[in-house]
């Protein structure tokens, strides 16, 4: 599967953005999906993930209540709705995918996702 992320941009603190990740192929519904981010000079960080059913979700503690992950299998697209953005959310955001189910405890591990899209840059000004 090939992944294409988009939707990044420059936003003021407190603002909102919606990231999208479009996947190629006809078996999108068979993939567990995730968002990671990498800020300048920092290591890649898990943000959010959801399982095949779109119900089982996991979030980084610092984004809980502000970010919402979702998927639309009919459109082969995953979303990350980001509200109340903070300057510390500034990063390059990457989408990732894994064929098959994934247990909750493994959702935040980058090494379980073999497929990655290019990043989309989110910059939050103070």
Image (tube, grey):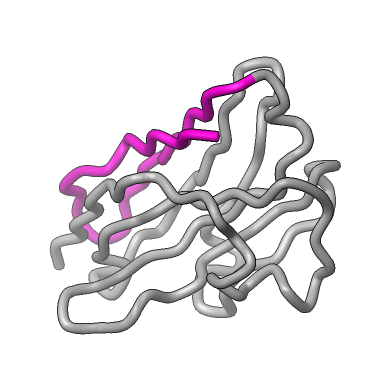
Q: Which residue is at the front of the view, 10 or 107?
A: 107
| Side (left or right) of 65 relative to 82 | right
Q: Is residue 18 magenta?
A: yes
Give the percent coordinates (x, y) of residue 5.
Answer: 37, 38
Main secondary structure type of the part rendered in magenta: strand
Image x and y of residue 59, in percent: 63, 68
Residue 89 image-quadrant placement: bottom left
The picture places residue 13, in percent across and down from the top left corner, at 25, 61
70 to the left or right of 119: right
- Taking the spot 76% from the left edge, 31% from the top edge, the residue there is 29
- Residue at 71% across / 53% down in the picture? 50
On-image quarter of the N terminus: top right
Question: Quick check: 56 above or below 120?
Answer: below
Corner quadrant of residue 73: top right
Q: Is residue 82 above or below residue 61?
A: above
Image side of residue 44 versus residue 54, left or right:
left
Query: Which of the two residues, 46 or 16, is positioned nearer the viewer here?
Result: 46
Q: Would residue 98 appear left or right of 95 to someone viewing this image?
A: right
Query: Going 47% across and 34% down the picture, which residue do you hit?
Result: 2
Residue closest to the eye, 28 or 8: 28
Residue occupying image coordinates x 68% and y 29%? 28
Image quadrant occupied by the C terminus: bottom left
Which region of the structure is painted magenta?
Answer: 1-25
């Amino acid at each position: 599967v090939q992944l294409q992320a988009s939707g990044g941009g420059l936003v003021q603190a407190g603002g909102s953005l919606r990231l999208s990740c479009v996947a190629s192929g006809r078996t999108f519904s068979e993939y567990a999906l995730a968002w990671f981010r990498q800020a300048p000079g920092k290591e890649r960080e898990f943000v959010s993930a959801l399982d095949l059913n779109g119900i089982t979700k996991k979030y980084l503690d610092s984004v809980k209540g502000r970010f919402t992950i979702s998927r639309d299998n009919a459109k082969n697209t995953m979303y990350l709705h980001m509200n109340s953005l903070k300057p510390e959310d500034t990063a390059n955001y990457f989408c990732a995918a894994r064929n098959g189910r994934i247990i909750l405890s493994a959702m935040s591990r980058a090494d379980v996702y073999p497929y990655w899209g290019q990043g989309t840059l989110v910059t939050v000004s103070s």
